[in-house]
Image (tube, rainbow, N blue to C red):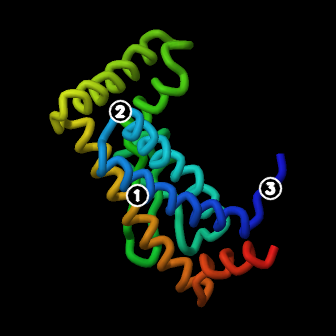
Amino acid sequence: MKEKSDYEILYYFYLHSDLIEEAWTEYKLNPTPLRALNLNSWILSSFNIYDDISRMLPGVLSRSKSQNLSPEENESAYELKRIKLSIQMNPLLLSIRNRVFYSKQGNKKIGGQNGRYFWELQKELISNNKGTSINLLEESTKEVIRFNNELELDLIEYYGFNYRKKLNIDSILK
């Protein structure tokens, strides 16, 4: 597989940040089950981009290594070096996404657990009752948006200019 360039990684980060904010705005206007699942997918896909950026710029973003986290959780926890802001993938939201993508295929025990969280979120959305799943989704979204904004500021500081504007100019010139 072809290695991603710095340009591609940053382009995906900025595009992805905009898409998360757009999905959040749509969700807040009308919180339907489909919009909640869409928002959840966008949130969790952020961690793949954080991984790429942490490999590209370890001085800006790094994986968090905490003693009280399991090895799986350590793989999805990141920290901004400048302000010591960290973010971690929530296992419950990951279970909901896994239920959407993989259904009950494979391990029945894990599939059933994923399904339970998925249906709890659906039930809360349909009944317009803010429960733990909705609160978790909304709080995680706010954390990801804040983390992205801080990371964007760190990238401006690292490069000495706003890389987002350079990407916009480059796309116009192509």
Quickly name the residue at label 2: 33
Label 2 sits on what residue type? Pro
Residue 3: mark in rendering: 3
**Mark 1 crowdedness (10 Å alpha carbons): few <14, some 14-19, many ≥20:** many
Residue 111: which quarter of the image? Answer: top left
Report if residue 85 is visible in the image: yes
Please tell me which residue lies in front, 169 or 76.
Answer: 169
Looking at the image, residue 25 lies above or below residue 75: below
Label 1 sits on what residue type? Val
N-term mark: 3 or 2: 3
Quickly name the residue at label 1: 144
Q: In the image, what residue occupies the spot 50% across and 62% down?
A: 18
Looking at the image, residue 105 lies above or below residue 91: above
Q: Is mark 2 on a helix, strand or loop?
A: helix
Q: Is mark 1 on a helix, strand or loop?
A: helix
- Asked whether the beta carbons under mark 1 and mark 3 sit within 8 Å of each other, the answer is no
Residue furthest out toward the bottom: 160
